[in-house]
Image: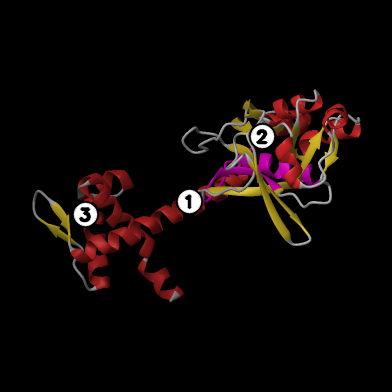
Amino acid sequence: MVQKIANTNLLDGMAVFVGIINTGSFTAAAQALGHSTSYVSKEITRLEKRLGSRLLNRTTRTISLTDAGRSYYERCSQIIIDAENAERSISQLQDRPRGLLRVNAPLSIGSIYLLDYFPEFMRLFPEITFEVEFNDRMIDVVAEGYDVVIRAGEIKDSNLVARKLMSSKSIVVASPDYLQANGRPQQPADLEQHACLAYSLIPNPTAWSFVKDGSHSTINFNPRLLANNAELEVAMLVRGVGIGRVPLFCCEKEIAKGKLEIVLADYEQPEIGVYAVFPHRQYLAARVRVFVDFLVQKFSD
């Protein structure tokens, strides 16, 4: 099979055939491909002879696809695209990481991690410039033209590639002052008597599930505060507004300083994955590839 392909120049014939359909004529295809019109005509004749089937209906003024030609064109088009992408991917590997990199991340992840990571990356890759937004709104990565988006939680869009950066536990926390004034919950049901703070940008933000010894329970509540970013939620918790459930990475410093305390620690909480998300492509721009690799390394450290 390899010998046959080498002798019959399959890709050349396919490229000529696809070029004719894409440009609409033998002459235009010849110009686009850098061949003579007679070469293009002979290539199609050889292709049809080899396949044993007519691909094109030709008159002096028009060309049209036969049924066999239509089927062959669909397959050939993808093959030509794959061949071009293969060449571009090799070229991309040699390309220096440079150009504009558009990044979006939640405010909490941006302020806790990325503010420390960006300076080092920018020193390593001085030809990359950045456009960065820290906010928690739901981003359409493709439609809004971002190169990399950092997201916490489940990634459901099959058109995106997600590389995991880390995992974090969810924990229920409150300030010592709040607990002293209102009592410490001993079981999830006790939370229904407390002022609960919730994060609005997740499914069912006012329904918290708990697991202990294989037993599941869920509480539903009317939130005292519904926040669209974890920074606001943690700040309000520190000020004694109520009890909230947040990712551990969002409040580790506050816990270490004694500003927040963990409650219901003997109950299992949902685990949250943090991902670098980017559009699904057969190859990546060098600036995207090195940035994602850098984040994976930094978060693993």
Neighbours of disc 2 within 10 Å: few (<14), some (14-19), many (20+): many
The earlier-in-sequence mark between 1 and 3 is 3
Q: Which mark is residue 38?
A: 3
Q: Position of residue 260 (x, y in %)?
A: 85, 32
Label 1 crowd bin: few (<14), some (14–19), many (20+), radius 10 Å: some
Nearest-to-viewer mark from 3 and 2: 2
Residue identifier under label 2: 198
Callout 2: SS: strand
Q: Three-letter amino acid code at disc 3?
A: Ser
What is the C-alpha distance between the residues marked 2 and 1? Answer: 46 Å
Residue behind mark 1:
85
Q: CA distance from mark 3 to mark 2?
A: 72 Å
Q: Which residues are magenta?
A: 272-300
Position of residue 217 relative to residue 298, above or below, is below
Tell me which numbered mark, 3 or 2, is placed earlier along the sequence.
3
Q: Could you say which is closer to the camera, residue 2 or residue 176?
A: 176
Calculate the distance from the C-alpha at mark 1 to the C-alpha at mark 3.
29 Å
Give yes or no for residue 21 being in the magenta stretch: no
Query: Is 157 on the left or on the right of 275, as rendered?
Result: left
Percent x, y of residue 63: 15, 53
The image quarter containing residue 74 is bottom left
